[in-house]
Image (cartoon, rainbow, N blue to C red):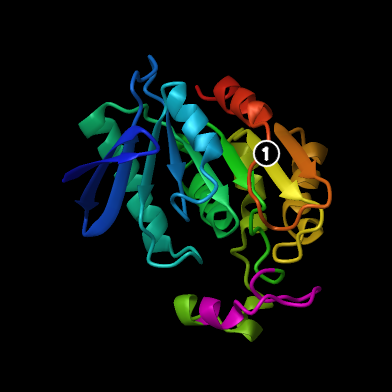
Amino acid sequence: MSEKVWNGFERLDFSFEGREAILIVPEQPNSNRNWLLKTEYFGAFPSFEIEMLKRGWHLAYIKNVTRWCLDEDLDLKKRFAEYLHEQYGLYHKCVPVGMSCGGLIASKFAAKYPNLISALYLDAPVMNLLSCPAGIGNAGNGMLSEFIDATGISLSELTYYRNHPIDKMPLLLKNNIPIMLVYGDSDNVVPYHENGAILEKYYRENGGMIKAIGKANCGHHPHGLEDNTPIIEFVEKYSL
């Protein structure tokens, strides 16, 4: 294990089951020892995470085989969460932070292991693989070949695939998982109307707890908000 500094906070780098793992430690952990799990792109658009560290939250990450969400990555995250609880005394539930493909991972992780989840923060999440990476319905984004190589799922197989994040919405709802959703209304990489909007509509129509914030004239980036207060308040409210 090596100790470093990340944005002014103690950073612990170590190996967990042969994978790169990171734990960022707040100066004064809160009483519940709550924590965020960044599901992909560690270090990208970190302003919300930094603000939560200042509020006593921990931040954790473990490297994926691929950003396209293999079951082995989900299962490893389950064991990683249990390890952080046992070894570091972190709360037995986390709040996954899923940006873009990280949203794909976060939502499927929450659906598979809801007992480990307090709430979800999804930001421009990939919810519909026919939209991203396949590009059906829009101009495409050039990521389909990467997806096929990573998962072994062909485009023809994807047309009848039933394991998209949007297929997991009933499980998220059944387990009463609150969702904070942020998106850009001009996103042409992960178009909202083909992804997050489906989740928002489903949750609202079926009584789920969801807060959605759209950013006018914003594309896929940047993630987060200029003022992260709404995200912070939502996550802290549902962090039990």
Image location (x, y in percent) of residue 135: 72, 75
Q: Could you tell whether 12 is left or right of 114 in the image?
A: left
Q: In this view, does 9 lie above or below 70?
A: above
Q: Residues within 10 Å of mark 1 (few under 14, many from 20)?
A: some
Q: What residue type is labelled 1?
A: Leu
In depth, the one of 56 and 82 nearer the eye is 56
Task: Find the residue positioned furthest to the top.
Answer: 31
Q: Majority secondary structure of the magenta segment? A: loop
Asked whether 143 falls inside the magenta stretch, the response is yes
Asked whether 153 falls inside the magenta stretch, the response is no
The image shows a total of numbered marks equal to 1
**SS class of the residue under badge 1?**
loop
**Which residue appears at 51% of the width and 42% of the height?**
46
Image location (x, y in percent) of residue 91: 37, 26
Image location (x, y in percent) of residue 159: 69, 78
Q: On the image, numbered disc 1 is attached to which residue?
A: 225
Task: Find the residue positioned furthest to the left.
Answer: 1
Q: Is residue 200 above or below residue 65?
A: above
Image location (x, y in percent) of residue 56: 41, 22
In depth, the one of 40 and 118 nearer the eye is 40
In depth, the one of 6 and 52 nearer the eye is 6
Which quadrant holds residue 188? bottom right
Which quadrant holds residue 8? top left
**Which residue appears at 83% of the width and 52% of the height?**
217
**Which residue appears at 75% of the width and 38% of the height?**
212
Q: Could you tell whether 70 is left or right of 85 in the image?
A: right
The span picked out in magenta is 132-148
